Amino acid sequence: MGLLEPTREAFALLLRGDPELLQIIWLSLWLSLAAIALIAPPSIALGVLLAKRRFPGQRALVVLAQALLSFPTVVIGLVIYLLLSRRGPLGSFELLFSPTAIVIGYMVIAFPILVVFTVSAVQGADPRVFETARSLGASRMRAALTILWEVRFGITAAIVNAFGRVVSEVGCAIMVGGNIAGLTRNMPTAIALETSKGDFAQGIALGMVLMVIALGINIAMALLQGEGGLK
């Protein structure tokens, strides 16, 4: 079977607003945004702390965060599965195969991305900004916020990259979410399922949505950065 007919069907699904397709898209976006909103503040705060303060074990924590960037997401899913399973230490909360479990998995995946990008951005900032803010009477918190404003484009890049990673994540989402229709089936897991069943139309439609989302958030970031981000 050629790709022309499934592609036509994919466009038809999108144009008529197929309810099942829209539900999958909405769930993916909602879970991804919720995970980033929850994990971004503590991750960015930790990144600033690791970049500006010197303490025993600081370097080891930075190396660990960098190592977690390449950690297989399916292994992350396995660890969370074991923690949330009935025999696991968190089994009593009955979170396995629920949207909450997927959000937890997404948060774990996004965490090292946000920390490492923040450390890199803050370390690359002019150290005189922090020192000047402190000399003018600003508290450490206010001085840290000044640094964050100076490196806002780097922080934005961290958030965009983290969102792009989790919205396209499939391994962890399947393991802890179970790919249950109407409950935990998101775009990546639906693409994997429908393609394995030979239903290429829905897979192509969801794939196009993912590509539009990826392109859209990168264009939005470039526009936020101004003309310098478009060069």
Image (spheres, grey):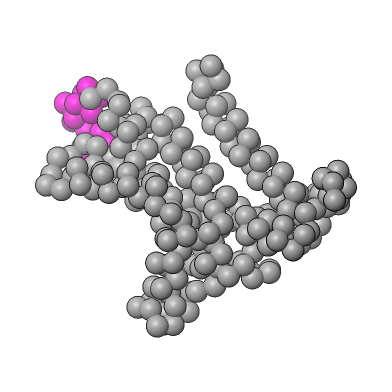
At x 27% / y 30%, what residue is drawn? 123
Q: Is residue 41 visible?
A: no
- 139 over 135 or under it: above or below: below
Q: Is residue 173 left or right of residue 123?
A: right
Residue 222 found in image quarter? top right
Residue 189 found in image quarter? bottom right
| Pick the front one: 132 or 2 | 2
Q: Is residue 109 left or right of residue 185?
A: left
Furthest-left residue in this view: 56
At x 19% / y 26%, what residue is drawn? 131
Task: Give the percent coordinates (x, y) of residue 126.
Answer: 27, 22
| Pick the front one: 145 or 102 | 102
Q: Is residue 101 visible?
A: yes
At x 64% / y 64%, what residue is drawn? 185
Residue 132 shown in magenta: yes
Task: Give the percent coordinates (x, y) of residue 182.
Answer: 68, 68
Q: Is residue 78 left or right of residue 11?
A: left
Task: Give the percent coordinates (x, y) of residue 64.
Answer: 27, 49
Numbered range of the magenta stretch: 128-145
- 176 over 210 or under it: above or below: below
Task: Give the percent coordinates (x, y) of residue 207.
Answer: 69, 47
Residue 188 found in image quarter? bottom right
At x 68% / y 56%, what residue is drawn? 191
Total tally of numbered discs in the picture: 0
The majority secondary structure of the magenta stretch comes to: helix
| Pick the front one: 34 or 146 | 34
Residue 220 shown in magenta: no
Q: Is residue 153 left or right of residue 116?
A: right
